[in-house]
Image (cartoon, grey):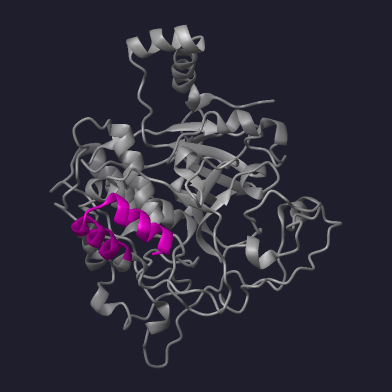
Amino acid sequence: MPPDMILSCVKNMNGRLFLTALLIQAAILSFSKPACGQTYTSPFEITLNPQIATWTSDFANRQAAIDPSSSPAPADWYSTAYPSPSWGPSNPQLYSVGSLSGAGAAAATELKFDRGKEVYNVGLNTAPGGVDETTWMRQRLMFAAQQLIGTHYQHLHLPTFDPAQVNVPSYTFPWQAVSNNTNLQTTQQLENAALTQTEANPYKAAYGSPQPGIDCTDFAAYIYNLALGVQMHSGTPDQISFIDGAGSPVALGPGAIPKSTLVSASGAVMTPEFLTSPNFGTSTPNAAGSLDGVVSQLQPGDLLYMHGNGSILHVVVWLGAFGTNADGSPSDVPLVISSHDNTPAIFDTQSINADGYPLDGNIAAHLPPPGVQILPFTSENWFYTNFSVAMQIVPVPEPSAFAMILSGLVLTGFFGMRGARRRQRCWLSLDK
């Protein structure tokens, strides 16, 4: 835990809550290590309510329930000959109910093929008095994400699994090396073949061998699982997919309708809302002028999916007001958090050259190690140019009648207009 975070905890928690927070983070992050001498300090952080340790007091028990129900069981993690390609042990389901039936059971069965076994009867805190459900859900979700910052990027389901410990005689773990390109590639180089990739990848040596970690879709599934008991697929092609008007599966393209299989902590099937990008279904990069329109409709916790070559390739979590500068002040750039492998490279600065590299030439200072990091969502980087669709799982509460009247007097009906826009969001395309 960084010193500034510790000081913040000391100021805002009593001793017991502070110790609880440390134990939770130690359990989740015991596997994270700096990458081969590379030093990086993020200019961003997640700022949460001072009472967050109380609101997440159930996290330790929920975290402890995940690994024992994986398949294979932890006792067999390092004596199992995994098939190739291997993504390590599967995340189990984490429900807070004893059994499921009907549509919930069918959805849970569908999820099992890439999510492992269910975990039953694990307590889930409820929102304290005076705290609305949406605020409580977002705070818990962001706390879960915060605990994984610094976790390495690897093609694994569980961040506690260490593939380097697999020990089976006459067997080699089918390792999937990541972030091992010789040179970095920026968004600008992806879009302009005339730009040469000449900057050496500083993390190539560190990520060419087995080590613990988690990938982007597993990160998204993991934090929703831990914080809210929400289950979703862990693989990129399945976490979000597309259908036509008749409900038949289709490839990502113009007119495709996004869908996702989600099960709540109570075992109910969930129906998220979707926001499509300005150039949804096409290979045309989103234009800089559309960024503000996209940002204005996103909410903290939304899952944003990036595309390439006609399919979904990556997912990030929108931070919104929770993403701040390292000193806790508001960030002047929109921020996301995800597990990213630096393909392409996303720098933490807007001061970049025409080829996409930092203007000051200090790549090591502006390029986080591959893994769970807070990064900008700006008009010049791949996260935005290739943004395809956003999935909103945490509901946005409709404003009360009093709020609508007040906002009409003060803000010319802004809240009312926003509510109407939200109800249409599933089919809204932010065309320029």
| Up/down of 76 relative to 136, above or below | below
The residue closer to the viewer here, 172 or 392, is 392
The residue closer to the viewer here, 109 or 217, is 217
What residue is shown at x 44% (from left), y 49% (from top)?
46
| Secondary structure that dominates the magenta span | helix
Horizontally, residue 355 falls left or right of residue 4, namely right
| Up/down of 99 relative to 244, above or below | below
The residue closer to the viewer here, 147 or 293, is 147
**Image quadrant occupied by the C terminus:** top right
What residue is shown at x 24% (from left), y 53% (from top)?
94
What residue is shown at x 50% (from left), y 36% (from top)?
258
Percent position of residue 28, x then y: 33, 65
Residue 402's quadrant in the figure? top left
Task: Identify the residue at the far right of this view.
Answer: 194
Q: Is any atom of residue 121 visible in this view?
A: yes
Residue 18 drawn in magenta: yes
| Up/down of 4 relative to 289, above or below | below
Q: Give the range drawn in magenta.
A: 1-25
**Image quadrant occupied by the N terminus:** bottom left
The residue closer to the viewer here, 235 or 334, is 334
Residue 95 drawn in magenta: no
Horizontally, residue 120 falls left or right of residue 400, namely left
Q: Is any atom of residue 114 visible in this view?
A: no
Residue 5's quadrant in the figure? bottom left
